[in-house]
Amino acid sequence: MKTDLYSRMYSRLEDLIPELSSISAPGASFYASPRSPTDMALFCSVASCSGDEVELELAKDEVVGGLEQAGHWMKFRIDRKTRTARLIACQTEAAYETIHGETIYPQSRHLPLNSFAVNWLGILVHLQFAFRTIVPAPSFN
């Protein structure tokens, strides 16, 4: 088993999303319910999927104007063939910002932000969060 940062990140995502290996199309959505009444709910959606490469967006509940809504938090690029994952965008205090590709962050910031992400995913695993598939309601049309 690989133990580098990006392999550990993949492993944490796999622990949190049991269906990770079978995701086959964009739009799939997952939900992890709050562990207590004061805890946050977590949402995960597949932004893109092409073969073994998947982009996942992780979001948490936020209260805006007195209403709860999902707020962007982290976005990952996953390679199921190499069993690695990288943080490609994250929510900062100021805005939702891209950290890979066209980026405002210098290369020297990628490792600390990915380290933060893998540690945070580890906390979610430790707290026993688990994402379950959201099944769309049947259409009556």
Image (cartoon, rainbow, N blue to C red):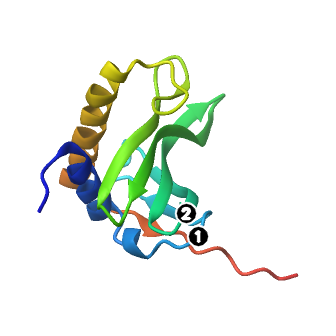
The percent position of residue 28, horizontal first and vertical second, equals 57, 66
Name the kind of residue labelled 1 in the image: Ala
Mark linked to residue 43: none
Q: Is residue 50 above or below residue 36?
A: below
Q: Which mark is residue 25?
A: 1
Residue 46 point in image, percent of width and height? 54, 59
Q: Residue sitting at 39 percent across and 63 percent down?
A: 131
* Residue count near mark 1 (Cα–Cα under 10 Å), binned few <14, some 14–19, many ≥20: few
Q: Are marks 2 and 1 in contact (CB under 8 Å)?
A: yes
Residue 97 on image: x %, y %: 53, 27
Mark 2 and mark 1: Cα distance apart in space: 5 Å
Q: Is residue 76 visible?
A: yes
Q: Which residue does the image show at 62% across and 63% down from the upper left? A: 27
Does residue 30 appear to the left or right of 4 in the view shown? right
Could you say which quadrant of the image residue 19 lies in? Answer: bottom left
Question: Label 2 belongs to which residue?
Answer: 49
